[in-house]
Image (cartoon, helix red, strand yellow):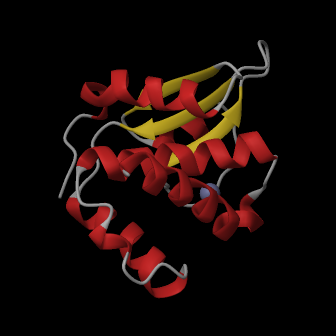
Amino acid sequence: MQIEDVETHRGELEVLLTRHTAHAVRLSVVPDVEQWSRDHDLPGQGNPIARALVHRASGDWVVLIRRSIGAEQITSVLDGLELFGGFPRIRQSLTTPTTFLNYLVLHELAHLANDWDQSCERECDEWALERVLQDER
Ligand SMILES: [Zn+2]
C-alpha cells in the first residue's frame, strides 16, 4: 500500500475528525512534516508522517500530515504497531489507504484531545485503533 496524495482523502478525514471531537481541527497536508516544522520554528524529532500541534493565534488544533506516504513508511508504522505496540494482527484491519489514514489522523487527535505528549504513543494508538475498529463495524 502507498498513498500518493492525502489531499484526495481530505473530505472523509474531515468528517472523521468532526465525528470524534467538537473542537476546531485543521487538517494540514504538507510535502514534508520535518521541513514544515523547521520552517515554522517548531522543535521536533525525526521526520514523522503526521504530527499534532496547536495553532498559537486561534487555539485551533492542527493535524499535520505528509501529502505522499510511501510503502516503506506505511510498512514501518504497521511493523511498529505489530512488533512493539501490542497490536500483533493490526495489518488485517488497516488494509486500505482510508483505514490507515483514519488511524494516523486519530492517533494525532488523541494527543490533542487527551493532552497526551510524546511519551503516550501507546495510549494514542489504543485510543485511535479502538475508534477505527468501531467505525469499521
Ligand atoms: Zn504520537
Is residue 74 toward the left or the right of residue 37 in the image?
left
Q: Residue furthest front?
A: 137
Is residue 26 toward the left or the right of residue 98 in the image?
right
Percent coordinates x, y for residue 109 in the rendering: 63, 41
Percent coordinates x, y for residue 95 in the rendering: 24, 60
When the figure is inspected, residue 137 is found, relative to residue 105, above or below; the finding is below
When the figure is inspected, residue 131 is found, relative to residue 57, above or below; the finding is below
Q: Is residue 45 visible?
A: no
Residue drawn at the location 66% of the way across and 30% of the way down: 21
- Looking at the image, which is closer to me, 27 or 106? 106
Percent coordinates x, y for residue 7 in the rendering: 30, 26
Is residue 2 toward the left or the right of residue 109 in the image?
left
Residue drawn at the location 57% of the way across and 51% of the way down: 107
Residue drawn at the location 69% of the way across and 39% of the way down: 42
When the figure is inspected, residue 76 is found, relative to residue 128, above or below; the finding is below
- Looking at the image, which is closer to me, 89 or 46? 89
Q: Is residue 134 visible?
A: yes
Q: Residue furthest top?
A: 58
